[in-house]
Image: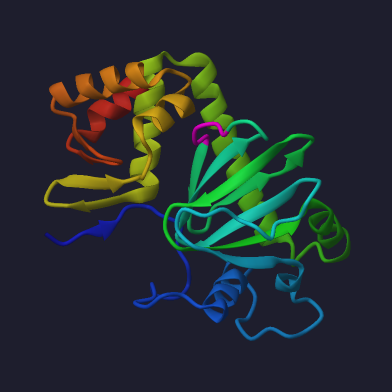
Amino acid sequence: MTLQMVDRPAFAERPLLRRPSMDDARARLRAVLEQPVDCVDDLDIAREFGIEFIPARTSLKAAPGAGPHLSLVLYGFVQHQTSSRHQKSPVSAIFTEGEWFESHRRHQRAALTVAVVDSWVAWIPASAIEMLIETRPAASRPILRGVTAALVAANDAANTLALADTAARVAHLLLDLERRFGRSGAGQTFVEHHLTQSDIGNICGCSRETANKILADFAQRGVLAFQTKAFELYDREWLVRRAR
């Protein structure tokens, strides 16, 4: 069965068939920022970013200490968690290539970015973004577009969490995962998202047991077949109706 990507963030170059290197990560960052790959002039805003390789199942280490910063997934995908000295919460979000997310450390709590697979992540302090907007507004536009898209997605998720019933929230999350991680073929879509049912419940504001019950109901209706950290979607239109 031939699989094709479904509406995922696009980059200028073709996907690599080898493990990405630091040079690949820098080139991809400049592609996102709409700068020449070999840019070396004074408007090279990629210099303001830190870039780090995160092996699978480990966390981002080199991000700034105190204060907010923005991160961008260049290769792979990561889970976002919040931890304290005493405990680690379930996954609160997942981000894939080309997506921005805000992360910070406050007092005893810290944002924890954990790679699901081997990943490259770029980050920049919020203070540096403010400087770029003031001194190089045209060059900072790709960052602002990315941040705006992230804010729209976060606002949409917040509205769904506040206004929709639990099953609608789960349906909305599944559609979002299908859009970002889905591969289509033979009249169905396969979505490998690497979220546990506890993670799904946490994102949707319900317990693992409730999430499991809703997913089982969707499966019984023939809408999808759920697998470990993945699902096959058969009836997207029904899921769209249920998410409203």
* Residue 121 image offset from top left, x and y in percent: 58, 61
Foreground pick, 25 / 84:
84
Q: Is residue 22 above or below residue 2?
A: below
Q: Residue at the spot x=48%, y=20% of the render?
A: 205
* Residue 244 can be seen in this image: no
Q: Is residue 117 above or below residue 148?
A: below
Image quarter where the C terminus lies is: top left
Foreground pick, 95 / 80:
80
* Residue 175 image offset from top left, x and y in percent: 35, 36
Q: Residue at the spot x=11%, y=51% of the render?
A: 186
**53 in the magenta segment:** no
Foreground pick, 216 / 146:
216
| Left or right of residue 224, residue 104 in this image | right
Q: Which residues are magenta?
A: 88-92
How has the structure been colored for display?
A: rainbow
* Residue 116 image offset from top left, x and y in percent: 43, 52
Q: Magenta segment, principal secondary structure?
A: loop
* Residue 137 image offset from top left, x and y in percent: 80, 62
